[in-house]
Image: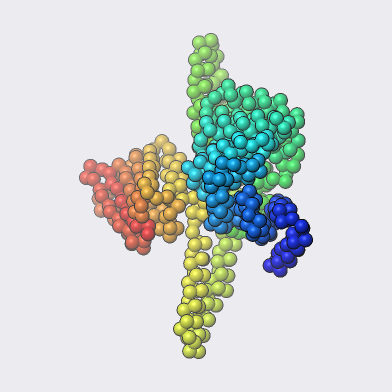
């Protein structure tokens, strides 16, 4: 691969040198990089882009320097080289922010600077630097406003609106999407105008402006006959589904899901289709269509099995965690929708009771019995699916165990044998140290792979929150759970995996003790992260039998705390109630 890229670079360079004008050569190289990036050969695009940057500096044209550095930043960011991408963007900004260039830019320079700022905004959002993302998105809008190309304006305004939406700046995002729509209509670009109207509708709905949302929906309906892009229609249908689910309109959501599944080419997007099935069966169950919900769940299970067979055991683990996380999110969304529907039916019930109280009671009694029967049937069917998924997951774990066995035998054991031979043959100390380092690195990597899969996708705060939510669901009606967390001067992502795992196990043990042995009716879990100090507290209002508290896992808790240099304190009140407190340094 290295020789192919070198040959490609020499070929493109020779074409450039054959050109009479260096500017033409730079523009040619930039076209080649765009083509390579669009074809997925981003590494080759970055290689050619480096040559374009070198020539732009030799020519000394500030507009071309900004353009080549901005494009190179996109390629490097796509390759995961964030620091190098930032350096390239910084080189472009050094020129774009100079007084002489800023005061007298031409049309091409304006477009290059606007594109530079929107690329920076996207990178900031990816890195969760939302304040910087908002600032760069607004600067991009300010610069493109000085241009005269409505097609480019529509694209920049739309991208800036999407970044601001991701940052929670909905009012600002709404303004940019409206500008994107107006400029798209100037060039009669139906797809761009349709997308802008759809995202404006979504933002207006989130802001509670129903009139504006309905107005944008009418615009989408007018443009719909001219839309041929499947991806554009898919984005619109997904937005409508999101609005319906947010507003508790499960019947409407089912209709939009059906339209998504009827799109030509949806089979080429199996993960989108799988996600659609996961949401659709919950919406069908919410409106009482349990048979359809069961059939949809079966389809989702079949699609999941086909995807499962294409992936190796590690991908299987990732898909299981993502599926469980999605199920949790859907359960929370369904709970909110159920509360909204309850309020609506309460108002409707008042009118019905005034009209025909006796008929309503008889009808309600019959419907309740029928609904309970359908729910029992659906629960039994879903339990069967759960058992099938559990069996497949266990098979995946067995494959993972065999892989780990091979890793230990072929990797660590061979490294130890090499160390023994080196010592026996009187090898050098430097060679022995190198072998030991390699062995230690293998053991460290395997130990990280043994971490619970949840920690690959979520922070300690999110995993503990999910644990408390599952306990609350399992003990609904008997025990009230509450969870609080705060990170004052740090991010939960900063907690090392080994410490996060032990803290999670300690909280899991303490909560389990309170549920099983204390007879508590209230359990509180609180965590805080202040700098490099992590604190956790588990409190309950239960009463343990005299002398039994020490045997309820407290020794295990103390051993785990000692393994991470943490401190555990246990307090029990004479009148009932106890707490387990943990303090540990994360660095």
Residues 429 and 185: in front is 185
| Residue at (58% x, 70% y) in the render | 406
Q: Is residue 296 visible?
A: no
Q: Residue at x 34, y 54 (%)?
A: 533
* Residue located 45% across and 58% down the image: 497
The percent coordinates of residue 136 (x first, y second) are: 53, 42
Front residue of this view, candidates 357 and 245: 245
Q: Where in the figure is residue 392, as x and y percent of width and height?
A: 61, 54
Q: Total label count?
A: 0
Q: Quadrant of the N terminus?
A: bottom right
Answer above or below: position of 408 versus 462.
below
Q: Residue furthest left?
A: 574
Q: Is residue 559 above or below residue 136?
A: below
The correct choice, above or below, for 255 with respect to 88 in the image is above
Is residue 571 shown left or right of residue 438?
left
Quadrant of the image containing the C terminus: bottom left
Q: Nearer the viewer, residue 384 or 149?
A: 149
Q: Is residue 438 above or below residue 262?
A: below
x, y (%) of residue 210? Answer: 56, 23
Residue 567 in view here: yes
- At x 75%, y 63%, the residue is 14
What color scheme is it? rainbow
Is 38 on the left-hand or right-hand side of 332? right
Indicate the position of residue 387 as horizontal and vertical percent values. 58, 49
User: Farthest top residue?
Assistant: 355
């Amino acid at each position: 691969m290295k020789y192919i890229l070198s040959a490609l670079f020499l070929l493109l360079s020779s074409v450039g040198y054959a050109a009479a004008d260096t500017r033409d050569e730079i523009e040619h190289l930039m076209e080649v990089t765009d083509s390579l990036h669009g074809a997925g050969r981003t590494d080759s695009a970055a290689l050619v882009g480096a040559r374009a940057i070198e020539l732009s500096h030799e020519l000394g044209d500030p507009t071309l320097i900004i353009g080549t550095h901005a494009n190179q930043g996109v390629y490097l960011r796509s390759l995961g080289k964030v620091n190098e991408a930032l350096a390239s963007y910084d080189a472009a900004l050094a020129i774009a922010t100079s007084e002489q260039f800023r005061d007298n830019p031409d049309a091409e320079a304006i477009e290059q600077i606007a594109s530079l700022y929107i690329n920076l905004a996207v990178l900031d959002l990816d890195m969760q630097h939302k304040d910087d993302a908002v600032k760069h998105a607004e600067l991009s809008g300010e610069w493109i406003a000085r241009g005269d190309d409505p097609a480019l304006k529509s694209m920049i305004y739309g991208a800036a609106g999407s970044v601001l939406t991701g940052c929670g700046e909905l009012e600002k995002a709404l303004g940019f999407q409206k500008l994107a729509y107006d400029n798209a209509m100037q060039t009669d670009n139906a797809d761009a105008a349709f997308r802008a109207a759809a995202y404006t509708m979504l933002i207006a709905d989130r802001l509670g402006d129903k009139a504006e949302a309905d107005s944008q929906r009418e615009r989408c309906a007018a443009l719909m006959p001219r839309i041929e892009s499947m991806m554009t229609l898919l984005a619109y249908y997904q937005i409508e589904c999101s609005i319906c689910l947010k507003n508790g309109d499960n019947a409407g959501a089912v209709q939009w899901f059906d339209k998504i599944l009827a799109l030509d080419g949806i089979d080429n997007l199996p993960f989108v289709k799988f996600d659609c099935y996961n949401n659709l069966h919950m919406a069908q169950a919410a409106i009482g269509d349990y048979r359809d919900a069961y059939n949809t769940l079966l389809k989702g299970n079949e699609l999941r099995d086909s995807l499962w067979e294409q992936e190796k055991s590690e991908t299987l683990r990732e898909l299981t965690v993502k599926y469980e996380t999605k199920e949790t999110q859907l359960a929370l969304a369904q709970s909110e929708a159920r509360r909204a529907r309850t309020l609506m039916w309460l108002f409707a019930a008042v009118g019905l009771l005034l009209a025909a109280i006796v008929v309503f009671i008889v009808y309600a009694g019959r419907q309740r019995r029928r609904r309970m029967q359908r729910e029992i049937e659906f629960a039994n069917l879903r339990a069967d699916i759960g058992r099938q998924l559990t069996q497949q997951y266990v098979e995946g774990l067995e494959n993972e165990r065999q892989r780990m066995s091979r890793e230990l035998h072929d990797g660590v054991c061979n490294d130890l044998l090499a160390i023994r031979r080196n010592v026996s043959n009187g090898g050098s100390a430097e060679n022995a140290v190198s072998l030991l380092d390699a062995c230690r690195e293998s053991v460290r990597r395997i130990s990280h792979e043994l971490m619970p899969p949840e920690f690959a996708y979520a922070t300690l705060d999110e995993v503990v929150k999910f644990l408390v939510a599952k306990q609350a669901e399992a003990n609904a009606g008997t025990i009230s759970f509450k969870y609080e967390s705060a990170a004052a001067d740090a991010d939960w992502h900063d907690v090392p995996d080994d410490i996060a795992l032990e803290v999670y196990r300690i909280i899991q043990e303490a909560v389990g003790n309170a549920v099983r042995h204390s007879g508590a009716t209230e359990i509180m879990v609180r965590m805080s992260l202040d700098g490099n100090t992590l604190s956790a507290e588990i409190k309950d209002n239960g009463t343990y039998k005299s002398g039994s508290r020490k045997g309820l896992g407290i020794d295990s808790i103390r051993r785990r705390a000692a393994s991470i240099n943490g401190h555990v304190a246990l307090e029990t009140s004479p009148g009932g109630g106890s707490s387990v407190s943990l303090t540990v340094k994360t660095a």
